[in-house]
Image: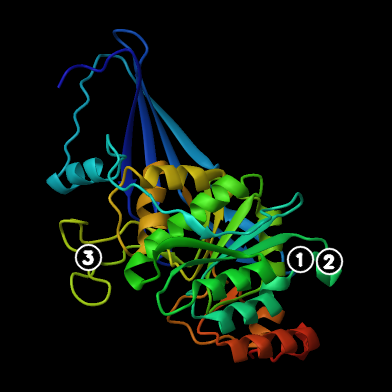
Amino acid sequence: MRSCPRGWRPFILLLSIFVGHRFFLLLFFTDRQVDDQTRVIDYVIQHDIVRLTTVANNRSTITTISKTMTTRRMTTTKTTTATTTMSPEQVQEQIYYRRQATIVNPFPYVLVTSPRTACPDGIILVIVVHSHPSYRERRDAIRRTWGRYGDSQQGEPRLTRLVFALGVDAKVSADAVKAESGVYDDIIQGNFVDAYKNMTLKSLLGLKWVSEQCARVPYMLKSDDDMFISIPYLIDILQTTRPKRSIMGPFNWHSKVHRRGKWAISKELFPFKWYPAYESGSCYVITVDIVRELYETSAYVTPLFIDDVYVTGILAKIIGVKHVVHEGFAYWIDRAPKACDFVTRKKISGTKVTPKLMYSLWKDMKELTAEKCPTKK
């Protein structure tokens, strides 16, 4: 290879290091030629994963911050030649994790139902719940429980905007959905079939709507309709930590790609054995400063139907996003939550929540205090 030219020349080496199976480090180093005889290499060790923990006073603190760096400098007194060797898989990754030159994933879908109003001033969090046209009972339960927090009609400052993202289903009357939207003004419905294999279309619909209608809102929460979210706790975390260019949620690292079964992805679509780091799609937060970039980048990246991998993993890696880890987010394999999980701020979210359980949790949370909840000895 040729000698290093004058100016900056960056290199990136990925070091995979387990710390409670949640962390890895990035070792960045820059190489610059000062003159013909002097070369300076700055090594910067940077944490790419930010971990949040909850301490005794129920405040969230950043214990590992990506801005914290350790820098070392090495100066040589003669010209050297930089040589890098990459495996075929590394070369393939370099090609895969970037925007294509032309559009490969257009989004021609339009809204057949949309809210009359978007996000008024003062909103902190826009909540996009993925639902199916036939799941009216679930939507009503969310509207009457955790989704109503911050609704000005409840005498509180309006801090949130709740919408439901739907596709279309021939078995569900379009007039019924429009009537529901007319009452609640909270449905965004795309003109694509609402099916499991179209989950990514629904995610892109949500990103597109938020980027166009709620660009001034700092945070977007994506949730499924069988979740229960402690919105007050989540807002407290966001206002305390104020993340930027980040995704926060149930973090997955080193997840193996399935070639068979429900989540099968072919090698033609995704040639690697392991997915990039991503957040489980049941519930995660995206800072709105990257929402438009995620949506626009998707047009140049071949889609996967597994929406969380595609949006919070592949697209996030391409545009350079921080993953913020908090133990309070539930994984899909977790048990259904109890009211004390939220009252004691042990959890931000709970999964496997039926409408009946949703109402029960909401009622119990109003009556319980942390002192009334059992503590482990």
Pointer 1 local density, CA inside 10 Å: few below 14, some 14–19, many at least 20: many
Q: Earlier in the sequence, mark 3 or mark 2?
A: 2
**The disc labelled 2 sits on which kind of residue?**
Glu
- 364 is higher (above) or lower (below) than 142: below
Whichever of callouts 2 and 1 sits on the residue coming sooner in the sequence is: 1
Q: Residue at x 14, y 22 (%)?
A: 1
Residue 156 circle label: 2
x and y percentages locating residue 353 in the rendered image = 55, 85
Measured along the vertical axis of the image, is residue 219 above or below residue 253?
Answer: above
Q: Residue at x 31, y 63 (%)?
A: 305
The type of residue carrying mark 3 is Ile
- The secondary element bearing badge 1 is classed as loop
Q: Amino acid at mark 1?
A: Gly
Confirm or deny contact between disc 3 and disc 2 (CB under 8 A).
no
**Above or below for 100 versus 193:** above
Q: Quadrant of residue 258?
A: bottom left
Look at the numbered discs 2 and 1 and tell me whether their residues touch, using CB distance below 8 Å: yes
Q: Which residue appears at 75% of the width and 69% of the height?
A: 57
Q: Is residue 49 left or right of residue 219?
A: left
Residue with the mark numbered 1: 150
Crowding near the residue tagged with mark 2, few <14, some 14–19, many ≥20 C-alpha atoms within 10 Å? few
**For the residues marked 3 and 2, what is the alpha-carbon distance in whole angstroms?**
46 Å
Tag 3 near tag 1, CB within 8 Å: no
Q: Choose between 255 and 87: the one closer to the eye.
A: 255
In the rendered image, which residue does mark 3 sit on?
A: 265
Distance between the alpha carbons at the discs numbered 2 and 1: 6 Å
Q: Position of residue 146 (x, y in %)?
A: 68, 75
Label 3 – label 1 distance at C-alpha: 40 Å
Image quarter (top left, top right, bottom left or bottom right) of the C terminus: bottom right
Left or right relative to 250: residue 228: right
